[in-house]
Each structure stands twice: as C-alpha cells, then as structure tokens.
Image: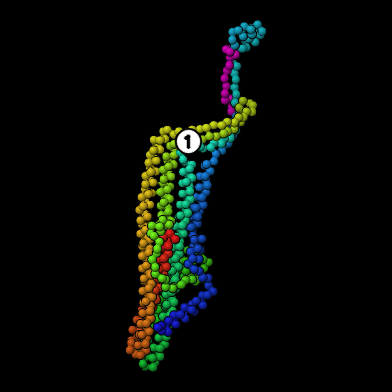
Amino acid sequence: MKHHFISALLLSTILQVNNIAAQNSYTLEQLCDSAISHNAQMSSARYNVEAARQQRKEAFTKYFPSVSAVGVWFNANKEMAETQINASDYIPQELGATLQQSFPPEALAALGNPITIAMMKDGVIGAVTAVQPIFTGGQIYNGNRLARVGEVVSQLQLKLSENEIIKTTSEYFWQTVSLQEKLKTVNAVDSLLQVIYGDVETAVQAGVAVRNDLLQVQLRLNDIELQRVKINNGISLMKLILQQYCALSDTIFTLQYTTDQIAQGESSTDPNQAVESTAEYQLLQKGVEAAELQKKMAVGKNLPSVAVGAGYTYHNLLDNDHSFGMLFATVNVPISDWWGGSHAAKRADIEREKAQDQLTSNAEMLKIRIHKARYGVSESQQQLAIAQKSIDQASENLRLISDRYAAGTAKMSDLLEAQLLYQQSYDAFTDAYSHLKLSETELKIAEGE
C-alpha cells in the first residue's frame, strides 16, 4: 500500500548507487581492521607487548649460572709488598758455632745485616667464575611469574586499546551511514515535491488552484535544499574523520551496510561469566596476582640465599706464572635488613588487599555495564520496531492526504505536513538503526566478545 513516492525513493537510491559504483567501498570490519593496523595507540600497545615478552625472557635467564670474567694488569711505582729479614735471628746457636768454624769472619758479619725482600711491583691477574643460585628466597621463581603476569597484562591492555578503536570506528561509521540514509530520504522527498510542484503549477495556470499553494511547495523545496547542503557537509566531514582515523587513501569511498530489521532477542550469556571474559576483569585479576607475587618477593629479599660456584684464576705476582681452580659455596643471611624488610612486606600485603578490593568493587560495576548495554540493545530494538511502524503509518497517511488533495478535499498545508511526517519517520528509523548497531557493539565489548 505504497504510493509513487516509494518508487521515487527507490529510484533515487539506485541512481546514487550507480554513480558511486566505481569508488572504493568499505565494510565496518574493514575500517576497524585498518584503524587497528595504523592507530598510534595500538602501535604503542604492541611495543609494550614485545617489551613485556623480552622482560619475561630476561627473567628466565636468572635460572642459569652467572658467569663473569675479570682481568687486571698493574705497574706500581714500587713493590706493594716489602719486608726485612735478619738472618742471624733465625740461626740456632749450634749452627752458629759450626758456621764460625767454616766461614770467614767477614761472611759471618754479613749475616748480621738485615735483608730487604720486595715483591709485586707489576703483574697480571685473570679470573673466570660461574655462580649458580641454589636458593634465593623464591625471588627468581616469583620474578619469573611476575614477568609472565606483566606479559599477559600488556596483551590485555592491547585488547582494551583494540576495543576502544572498534567502538570509535563504529561510531564514525554509523554516524556517516545515518547521514547518508537521511540524504537518500531528502532526495526522495525532493523528487516527490518536484512532482507536486509541477502538478500545482499546472493547476494554478489552469485556475483551479491558488498561487499560495505553489509558494508553500516552493518554501518546502527551499528547506529540503538547505537540509541537503547541511547533510552533504556532514558527510564530507565524517569521511575526512574516517580517512584520518582509519588511514584511508582519500575521502572518495562508500560504505557497505544493510538496514534490515533485526530480530529482537535477549542475550543468554550469564552476566557473571560474561564479566570474567572481559579484558577489564582479567586485568584486575592480574593486578591481584601481581600484588601477591610482589609480597612474596618482598619476603624473599629477607631470606637467606645460597649459591655454589666454580672459578679459575691465573696470576704472575711472584714473577712466575701460577694458575689454580676452585669450587666454592656462599651463604648470605640478611640480618639487619629484616627491620626495614618486614615493613616492606607489610606494605606489599596492603597493596594486595587493595587490589583485591578493587577487583570485587569493579566486578560489580562491570556487571552493571553489561546490564546497561543489554537494556540499551533492547530499547534500540523497540525503537527500531516503532520507527518501522511509523514509516508504514506515515506512508499510508501521505497516500490518503495526496488522494484527498487531488480530489480537492485537503489543503496544501495538510499535504506538506503529511510529507514532513513521512520524512521524519524515515529519519527516525535511520537514527534508531544506527543507535541499535552502536548498542550492539557496546554490548559485545561489555561482554568481552
């Protein structure tokens, strides 16, 4: 039960599609992918993921022995070790009597003079050691766990950035779609008014209609032209925004979409399960886990540490080459550190409790966000259904008023008002559909899909 203005709307739509067939055409998914690939925020988040991955690998190396080498060469202005020895002090009396009989007096007198001994004026020292930690109070183990948590956190933050870009791109996309659909409606209404204007002009010339009717149609045509200018400007601006945000080559493109009625239905996902699958909730969980590990590391710093090692050393300090190897073990017991370390552990425990409270509180807020998003989708579906009924009613009303005007039983103002209601019903449908698609995007993000 549609009138010829429906045909005009379809014809206008077909002509527009034919005129832009050669342009680049993008779906919402393609624009989202492009925005994600080129967005600076996403690039920074990817770098953070890679940095966290390298930090995890760095932490893993702490399980292996620490190998170090040192080399020293020195040349002092004098020997570093020097002493004097008086040989007569070390000769027993029995040996002294024997020497008096065997050596001349001059030689025996020389034994009473002190002898200077000096060494290590220059030399070379080289050493290689390998130390394997055996027990470090759990710092290496917990440090590796903390590094893995950091990597997961960076990936979740990357997901949050991706969700934000998808949401923003969807807003820009459906705002542009809304304007384009309104432009189609304006063009269809303009075509209808042009037909009415021609009919009224003919009637005025024939003397069966007053000129005031023609002026009313002309004013309505002027208003339609002003709307077209504003909508075209809005579309141009939105395409510029999409071009910049999605890294498109130019603004000469079209958008692929449909405006089919969407079936109503409630989400069957349990809110508690939905919350747990969101990146925000998982981030809060990782915050609690990280706080717990930091507490363990704070405690571990105050525990004894045990390590074993092996080394090889070379030197020529005594003017001859000498080298040796050795095995060793070390035990380090922090004693005075317990004073400050106990407070550090308590502070870490407070941070853990704080993170747990944030998890509990924000989890409830995330559930509320899911319910709000579901209500938004349901409300948008109802608005869309009402808008569709309004189109049918406005179309039928316009048909009846058109017939009555042709029969001379309705005024031009009635016809133009019916035409305005018809346009408004289509605009309301366009707005409702765009709002529904945005609500669906928000629901998917809220439920962690």
Which kind of residue does numbered mark 1 sit on? Ser
Residue 416 in view in this figure: no
Q: Position of residue 339 (x, y in %)?
A: 39, 35
**Residue at x-position 53% and y-position 72%:** 23
Disc 1 target residue: 305
Vertical comparison of 70 with 282: above or below: above
Looking at the picture, how far across and down is residue 229, in whole percent?
43, 75
What percent of the width, then of the height, locates residue 47? 50, 53
In the picture, which quadrant includes the N terminus?
bottom left
In magenta, the rendered stretch is 76-90
Q: Is any atom of residue 4 visible in this view?
A: yes
Q: Is residue 83 on the magenta stretch? A: yes
Say left or right for 27 vs 207.
Answer: right
**Any magenta on residue 236?**
no
Establish if 212 lies above or below 427: below
Above or below, 251 against 55 in this view is below
Q: Of 250 and 146, which appears nearest the observer?
A: 146
Question: For numbered disc 1, what is the local secondary structure?
Answer: strand
Residue at 41% in and 73% down: 430
Against 321, residue 139 (above or below) is below
Please tell me which residue lies in front, 340 or 440: 440
Residue 151 drawn at (x, y percent): 48, 50
Quadrant housing the C terminus: bottom left
Q: Residue at x 44, y 73 (%)?
A: 259
Residue drawn at (38%, 91%), measured in percent from left and top?
Answer: 203
Quadrant of the rendered image containing residue 446: bottom left
State left or right for residue 235 relative to residue 101: left
